[in-house]
């Protein structure tokens, strides 16, 4: 018989202690308040979804899904993201609402991790989905809102890096004949293995011009000025259209007055394959992981029977916790100590204090009182007992 599990938790799961949870709830409130000001309405979806609907539509790899069976033998999944569940709702319960839909959420999502990964398998996300607009202004709204919520959370120094899936796909179509080679090159970019990328390009026996264009791709990181270089290595196809879109996007971001927080990174690639246009990640100074990520996913809604464009982003709350500046709200704390004989009067006094002030009022029976310094945080201790009742 196996030993009972006492304090162990499933791999990748964690407890959130009071001080950390207080900060998390404060951050969530700040983010949601900002999103509401931009016209977004909060939505909640089930923790469990059918694998054949949300699980199949999600861009999360199948081996990262938590699967289980219901009593009828149907396969369920713990939601791996919020985008696919919201797409399901927008195509069913909200199908008669006019577009665009502006929806926001705060939820936990679940992704299975390998034993050696050392990452959370359950983590919180706060994000938005803007469904029904394919304009450059919708992309700019998502980016400007992402910047606004990071500022609202107290993140002082950060940048949003913007890539474009259409640019990468288009450039590879113009220069690399074999689809398998394109997949391999994308993998090098995803892991930021630029040395491996160049070696692989050399091994393909491409024309000198194609080699040059692919290697120039690795230099396309910076401000508006790099768009001229990006255009120079493309022809009049998908990649060129992406550059035109990025120029228009820059103009819209300047109108929002957020361009100082933006940089372009045209070799940026996501692990999620449902993005169809821009893709972006937000990084704080001195942090190696993205605080937020998002982009355009125009193909997802069609999988639920309501074809329309969409864009959005999600903030990773555990990473935001590390980057955000937070000072806990300081409130006066009062302790009411009482004996059993004085319980009624003591509790009435405590309730009166709570009604007439915003102080934190804690009640404690005197027999349980331990005068070991643990109550030093109280500005006042009200004693409602006889001294001989105290220990």
Image (cartoon, rainbow, N blue to C red):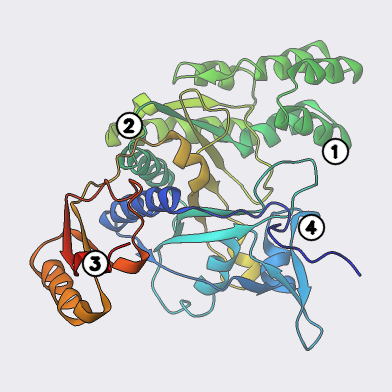
Report the front residue among 328 and 340.
340
Circle 4 crowding by C-alpha within 10 Å: few under 14, some 14–19, many from 20 = some
Image quadrant in which the N terminus is located:
bottom right
Q: Nearer the viewer, mark 1 or mark 3?
A: 3
Q: How far apart are the two marked residues, 4 and 1, measured between alpha carbons?
A: 22 Å
Question: Residue 147: horizontal and vertical position, in percent?
Answer: 37, 38
Q: Nearer the viewer, mark 4 or mark 1?
A: 4
The first of marks 4 and 3 along the sequence is 4
Q: Which mark is residue 62?
A: 4
Q: Quadrant of residue 229?
A: top right
Report the front residue among 137 and 261.
261
- Which residue does the image show at 61% across and 47% down from the upper left? 276
Q: Could you tell whether 333 is left or right of 211 in the image?
A: left
Q: Secondary structure at mark 4?
A: helix
Q: Secondary structure at mark 3?
A: helix
The first of marks 4 and 1 along the sequence is 4
Q: How far apart are the two marked residues, 1 and 2, measured between alpha carbons?
A: 37 Å
Q: How far apart are the two marked residues, 4 and 2, measured between alpha carbons?
A: 37 Å
List the residue tagged with mark 1.
179
List the residue tagged with mark 3.
388
- Which residue does the image show at 38% across and 48% down from the upper left? 23
Decide: is 193 above or below 49. Answer: above
Q: Could you tell whether 202 is left or right of 372 in the image?
A: right
The first of marks 1 and 3 along the sequence is 1
């Amino acid at each position: 018989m196996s030993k009972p599990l006492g304090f162990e938790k499933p791999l990748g799961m964690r407890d959130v202690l009071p001080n950390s949870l207080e900060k998390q709830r404060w951050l969530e409130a700040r983010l949601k308040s900002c999103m509401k000001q931009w016209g977004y309405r909060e939505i909640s979806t089930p923790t469990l979804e059918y694998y054949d609907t949300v699980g199949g539509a999600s861009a999360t790899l199948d081996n990262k899904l938590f699967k289980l069976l219901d009593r009828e033998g149907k396969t369920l999944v713990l939601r791996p993201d919020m985008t696919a569940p919201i797409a399901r709702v927008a195509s069913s319960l909200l199908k008669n609402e006019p577009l665009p839909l502006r929806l926001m959420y705060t939820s936990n999502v679940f992704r299975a991790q390998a034993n050696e990964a050392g990452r959370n398998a359950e983590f919180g996300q706060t994000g938005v989905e803007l469904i029904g607009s394919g304009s450059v202004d919708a992309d700019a709204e998502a980016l400007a809102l992402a910047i606004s919520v990071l500022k609202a959370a107290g993140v002082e120094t950060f940048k949003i890096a913007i890539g474009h899936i259409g640019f990468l796909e288009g450039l590879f179509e113009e220069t690399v004949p074999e689809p398998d080679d394109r997949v391999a090159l994308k993998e090098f970019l995803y892991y930021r293995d630029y040395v491996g990328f160049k070696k692989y390009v050399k091994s393909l026996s491409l024309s000198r011009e194609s080699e040059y264009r692919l290697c120039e791709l690795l230099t396309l990181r910076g401000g508006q000025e790099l768009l001229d270089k990006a255009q120079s290595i493309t022809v009049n196809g998908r990649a060129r259209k992406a550059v035109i879109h990025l120029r228009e996007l820059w103009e819209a971001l300047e109108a929002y007055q957020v361009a100082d927080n933006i940089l372009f990174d045209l070799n940026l690639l996501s692990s999620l394959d449902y993005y169809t246009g821009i893709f972006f990640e937000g990084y704080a100074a001195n942090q190696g992981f993205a605080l937020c990520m998002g982009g355009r996913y125009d193909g997802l809604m069609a999988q639920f029977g309501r074809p329309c464009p969409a864009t959005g982003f999600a903030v990773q709350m555990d990473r935001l916790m590390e980057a955000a500046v937070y000072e806990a709200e300081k409130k006066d704390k009062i302790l009411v100590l009482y004996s059993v004989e004085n319980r009624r009067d003591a509790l009435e006094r405590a309730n009166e204090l709570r009604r007439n002030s915003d102080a934190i009022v804690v009640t404690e029976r005197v027999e349980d009182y331990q005068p070991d310094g643990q109550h030093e945080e109280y500005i006042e201790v009200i004693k409602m007992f006889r001294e001989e009742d105290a220990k």
